[in-house]
């Protein structure tokens, strides 16, 4: 019938923390404004967890990979906790657990981009050029995607079809990821 409340709490809190970690990674990937209040909040929330790993993990160019590493560890922890609560053995198939966690992180990143593109499209209709920190951050995250898509489908007059290409690409990748874990 219903879902166990403990499982719901574990998944919700874990996925929320993973979202914040992935946002930190995507903000640095897009080179978003570090002084944006939302960016500052994300950095402050995640820094205590990331500080030990930042000393250990090497940077990949300008990219700090510690948010991805912690997100993967949290995702693995969520899966392990759920398996143990269901009475399963976590050590039995650790390789598939890691594959599920990596695919889950990729799917979460694609979902973030999907909703950010939707937000960017709506903001471009409702409040273009807004000075609020949230629309600016959404624009900075999605700008590299739009530029890449506009190389394939340039704007036609005043009509930009690049969001449609981005949505289709995200859906195709997510369907392939779903086939990978089945």
Image (spheres, rainbow, N blue to C red):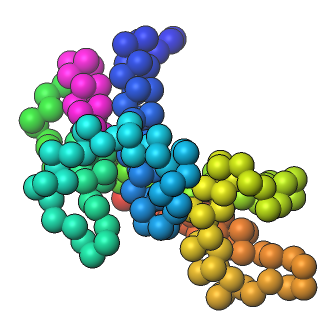
Q: Nearer the viewer, residue 59 or 146?
A: 59
Task: Name the side, left or right, on which 64 lies relative to 152.
Answer: left
**In front of the other: 110 or 100:** 110
Dominant secondary structure of the magenta stretch?
helix
User: Which one is in front, 12 or 172?
Assistant: 12
Q: Residue at x 65, y 74 (%)?
A: 146
Total count of labels: 0
Please state if 16 lies on the left or on the right of 163 as rendered. left
Q: Residue at x 73, y 69 (%)?
A: 164
Question: Image quarter for residue 117?
Answer: bottom right
Does the magenta segment cover residue 80?
A: yes
In the image, residue 57 lies in the stretch drawn in magenta: no
Measured as percent of width and height from the top left, residue 26 is found at 45, 59
Residue 5, placed above or below residue 79:
above
Q: Residue at x 43, y 66 (%)?
A: 29
Q: Position of residue 77 (x, y in %)?
A: 23, 33
Quadrant position of residue 118: bottom right
- Relative side of 67 to 35, left or right: left
Q: Residue at x 10, y 55 (%)?
A: 56
Is 139 located above or below residue 72 in the figure? below
Residue projecting furthest to the front: 35
Q: Is residue 176 left or right of residue 60?
A: right
Residue 174 visible in rendering: no
- Residue 104 rendering spot, x and y as whole percentages: 38, 48
| Nearer to me, 29 or 72 | 29
Residue occupying the far right of the picture: 157
In magenta, the rendered stretch is: 74-87
Camera sees residue 158 = yes
75 in relation to 148, above or below: above
Q: Position of residue 72 (x, y in %)?
A: 27, 47
């Amino acid at each position: 019938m219903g879902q166990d409340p403990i499982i719901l709490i574990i998944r919700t809190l874990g996925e929320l923390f993973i979202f914040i970690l992935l946002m930190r990674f995507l903000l640095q990937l897009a080179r978003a404004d570090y002084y944006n209040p939302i960016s500052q909040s994300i950095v402050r929330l995640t820094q205590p967890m990331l500080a030990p790993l930042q000393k250990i993990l090497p940077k990949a160019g300008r990219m700090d990979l510690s948010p991805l590493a912690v997100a993967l560890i949290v995702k693995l922890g969520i899966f392990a906790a759920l398996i143990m609560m269901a009475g399963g053995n976590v050590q039995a198939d650790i390789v598939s657990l890691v594959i599920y966690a990596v695919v889950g992180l990729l799917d979460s990143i694609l979902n973030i981009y999907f909703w950010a593109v939707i937000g960017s499209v709506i903001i471009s209709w409702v409040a273009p050029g807004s000075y609020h920190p949230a629309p600016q951050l959404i624009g900075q995250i999605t700008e590299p995607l739009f530029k890449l898509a506009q190389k394939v489908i340039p704007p036609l007059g005043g009509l930009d079809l690049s969001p449609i290409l981005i949505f289709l690409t995200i859906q195709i990748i997510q369907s392939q990821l779903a086939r990978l874990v089945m």
